[in-house]
């Protein structure tokens, strides 16, 4: 099942990269996005014991910009199978839109997650993470992001039942002051997860 899903994700990513584009950076961005999606698909196949994988779909916005994301998630209990503290890794491809400007973002974010009431039917959780990101352009509307290398940070709360989860996140994208100006984008995001 996981192998078929990995092949399907890789095929969908190939179809994305075959589209012609008027923007020279977009074709490179789509190829990089295909590679990230393939890595996420491989995470679904090669998961160690006690770990869990999932697919993430999200959307959000801030400062007049809007974004939609698709990605993968891998989590592992900190100490044992019954631990409430988890660590993990989220990889995602995000498409941004601000007026007539488009931007692609690739992120790989290490996460910490704490699950409340792990044996309950509805399980609340909190999480936080920060990791590297790459963006296809440094200007998005009136936001000057200054460098293609960025940091993607997030903190959120969520609720999970069985294989499904939903989370509300406060996110921030900026270069951490390594190049000026560093205006960044802070935004709210809503994420749905399907866990295997």
Image: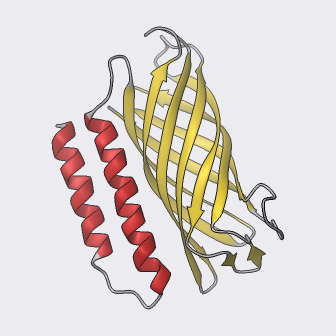
Residue 84 vs residue 146: left or right? left
In front of the other: 180 or 96: 180
| Residue 94 to residue 71: above or below | below
Residue 163 in view, yes or no = no
The count of marks equals: 0
Residue 60 point in image, percent of width and height? 61, 59
| Quadrant, the N terminus | top left
At x 46%, y 86%, the residue is 24
| Residue 12 to residue 100: above or below | above
Colour style of the rendered protein structure: secondary structure
At x 76%, y 63%, the residue is 184
Residue 180 vs residue 82: left or right? right
Residue 134 in view, yes or no = yes
In front of the other: 62 or 53: 53
Residue 33 vs residue 64: left or right? left
At x 67%, y 77%, the residue is 140
In front of the other: 64 or 122: 64
């Amino acid at each position: 099942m996981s192998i078929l899903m990995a092949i399907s994700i890789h095929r969908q990513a190939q179809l994305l990269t075959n589209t012609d584009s008027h923007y020279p950076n977009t074709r490179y961005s789509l190829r990089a996005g295909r590679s990230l999606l393939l890595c996420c698909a491989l995470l679904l196949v090669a998961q160690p014991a006690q770990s869990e994988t999932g697919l993430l779909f999200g959307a959000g916005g801030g400062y007049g910009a809007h974004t939609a994301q698709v990605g993968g998630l891998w989590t592992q209990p900190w100490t044992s199978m019954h631990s409430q503290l988890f660590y993990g890794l989220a990889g995602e491809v995000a498409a941004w839109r601000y007026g007539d400007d488009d931007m692609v973002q690739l992120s790989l974010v290490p996460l910490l997650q704490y699950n409340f009431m792990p044996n309950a039917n509805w399980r609340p959780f909190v999480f936080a993470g920060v990791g590297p990101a790459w963006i296809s352009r440094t200007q998005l509307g009136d936001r000057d992001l200054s460098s293609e290398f960025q940091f993607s940070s997030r903190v959120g709360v969520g609720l999970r039942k069985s294989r499904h989860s939903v989370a509300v996140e406060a996110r921030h994208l900026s270069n951490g002051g390594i190049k000026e100006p560093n205006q960044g984008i802070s935004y709210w995001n809503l994420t749905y997860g399907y866990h295997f």
